[in-house]
Image (spheres, rainbow, N blue to C red):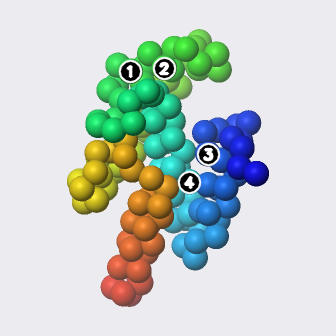
Amino acid sequence: MESSSPTGPLTRGDAERIEATLLPTLDRHHLRLQAHCLATLKSIAAPRCCGPLPSDEEIQAWCGQQPALRDDSDFQDELLRQFQVISDQLNTLADVCGRTPLELTLDALINDAEAASRRRLAQGG
């Protein structure tokens, strides 16, 4: 049964798929961060399911609606910076895949992470 985790937007199945990759630990961690951010950005953008990722203003409004974040503007600022970093990565991947960022899937993230890992191995490090 795939249900949402109580601590985040990824399903148990998503987490298991990430763990089942043969990626090095650090790459799997980065993949989890990307997948978590993508799922969160998709939920912020809902009901849109294609097109650009949410704007900084949309993300800030979402942060203001989260009880755990509402009274911590410093953390909200840092979270927004982290979303911006991952958004840049997702936008680049979407361009490569010929999709809009909101159309990206966990499969696309896994394929990209595995390809990057293979390239690093082929280059000797």
Task: Give the number of marks.
Answer: 4
Q: Label 1 near label 2: C-beta < 8 Å? A: yes
Q: Which residue is mark 3?
A: 10
Category of crowding for the residue at label 3, using alpha-carbon neighbours closer than 10 angstroms: few (below 14), some (14–19), many (at least 20): many
Q: Which residue is mark 2?
A: 62
Kind of residue sitting beneath label 4: Arg
Q: Visible in this render: residue 92?
A: no
Separation of marks 4 and 3 at Cα, in angstroms: 9 Å
Separation of marks 2 and 3 at Cα, in angstroms: 18 Å
Residue beneath the point at 38% across and 71% down: 116
Nearest the viewer among 53 and 78 is 53
Q: Quadrant of the C terminus?
A: bottom left
Nearest the viewer among 11 and 92 is 11
Nearer to us: label 4 or label 3: 3
Q: Is residue 119 above or below residue 58?
A: below
Residue beneath the point at 58% across and 76% down: 22
Left or right, 96 with respect to 10, comes to left
Nearest the viewer among 60 and 81 is 60
Kind of residue sitting beneath label 1: Glu
User: Which numbered marker is on residue 58?
Assistant: 1
Separation of marks 3 and 1 at Cα, in angstroms: 21 Å
Q: Secondary structure at mark 2?
A: helix
> In the rendered image, which quarter is residue 4 located in?
top right
> In the rendered image, which quarter is residue 10 located in?
top right
Separation of marks 2 and 4 at Cα, in angstroms: 21 Å
Residue beneath the point at 59% across and 68% down: 25
Kind of residue sitting beneath label 2: Trp
Q: Which residue is mark 4?
A: 32
Category of crowding for the residue at label 4, using alpha-carbon neighbours closer than 10 angstroms: few (below 14), some (14–19), many (at least 20): many
Indicate which disc, 4 or 3, sits on the residue closer to the N terminus: 3
